[in-house]
Amino acid sequence: MNKKLTELTVLIKGGGEVASCVAHRLYRAHFKVCMTEAPQPQAVSRGVSFSEAVYDGEKEVEGVVAKLVKSASEIPWVWGDNKIPIIVDPEATIKDTINPDVLVDAIMAKRNLGTRITDAALVIGLGPGFRAGKDVHLVVETNNTEKLGEVIFAGEAEENTGVPIAIGGLTSERALHATVEGLFVTEREMGEQVSGGELIASVGGQAIKAPTSGIIRALLRSGIQVKEGTKLVEIDPVASKEICYSLRARMRAIAGGVLEAILIRFNV
């Protein structure tokens, strides 16, 4: 391939926190980034998720703006405006129109939902569910261990433990998941201070209470229909409100692994 690195087009599947950090890193490295999302995103870390543009038209994360587009014809205009285009396209069919050089599956579903190694010249899978050399060309480790952000050339990433990073000595106690299916309703905002046991929201009329005292670091958008097991809330017992709008070190490490993978393939 004779393209300059800055001419490479990168399609990122997903608009949540991990996908957004990857998009942010690659945008700042001057790649032409485009994102795809579902029609009703369920990102909990909404302060740092470009998927919010699906609801609001635009979303800014640490100085970088994503803009919702309705069709492929709008994408060059958004790039020209120095923004990241994001389109509702859960199957990522836009790839057949823009022909990306790189495709990154950052949906974080813990399983492959349809990404194929033939989708682009370089296909990267994030986390478990992908096998390097079979489903994708390369895998980037997402588990919070010493291997975080490592580029995997053969095999798979580590299995996800499902346990959040410890903050203030707390792990699983900080997060709340839906125990029933139903409509998620809340009047709370990210960054609010809450006390343990205080009402935060409801799902299908069932009360959701704070598991511990702290700030609401992450909170699902109100009015969304959720399934049992959906992550709803995350409490940070020690941080201030600003943390809700800052990309986390773990996500930056994953994004660095994606950038490394692209340079391995194209910087020759």
Image (cartoon, rainbow, N blue to C red):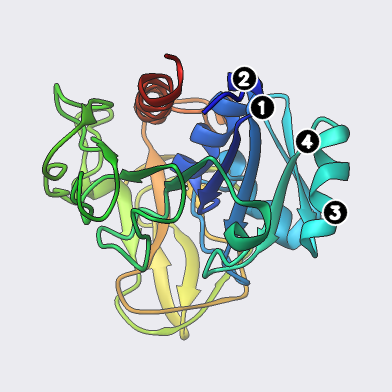
Q: Amino acid at mark 2?
A: Lys
Quadrant position of residue 70: bottom right
Q: In 3D space, how far apart are the residues under numbered discs 2 and 3 (Cα atoms)? A: 23 Å
Q: Amino acid at mark 1?
A: Glu
In front of the other: 222 or 106: 106
Left or right of 122? Residue 6 is right
Q: Residue at x 35, y 59 (%)?
A: 116
Q: Nearer the viewer, mark 2 or mark 3?
A: 2
Left or right of 131? Residue 98 is right
Q: Can you give x and y, in whole percent of width and height, for residue 130 in the image? A: 23, 53
Label of residue 4 in the image: 2
Would you name the residue on which mark 4 appears?
83
Q: Amino acid at mark 4?
A: Lys
Would you name the residue on which mark 3 appears?
74
Sooner in the amino-acid sequence: mark 2 or mark 4 = 2
Screen quadrant of the C terminus: top left
In front of the other: 38 or 247: 38
Q: Can you give x and y, in whole percent of width and height, for residue 68 in the image? A: 77, 55
2 and 1 marks in contact (CB < 8 Å): yes
Q: In 3D space, how far apart are the residues under numbered discs 1 and 3 (Cα atoms)? A: 18 Å
Count neighbours of disc 4 (C-alpha within 10 A) and say few if under 14, some if 14 to 19, many if 20 or more.
many
Q: Nearer the viewer, mark 2 or mark 4?
A: 2
In front of the other: 164 or 88: 88
Q: Secondary structure at mark 3?
A: helix
Residue at the top extreme of this rendering: 268
Label of residue 7 in the image: 1
Q: Secondary structure at mark 2?
A: loop
Q: Residue at x 59, y 30 (%)?
A: 24
**Is residue 18 depicted above or below 152 in this figure?**
below
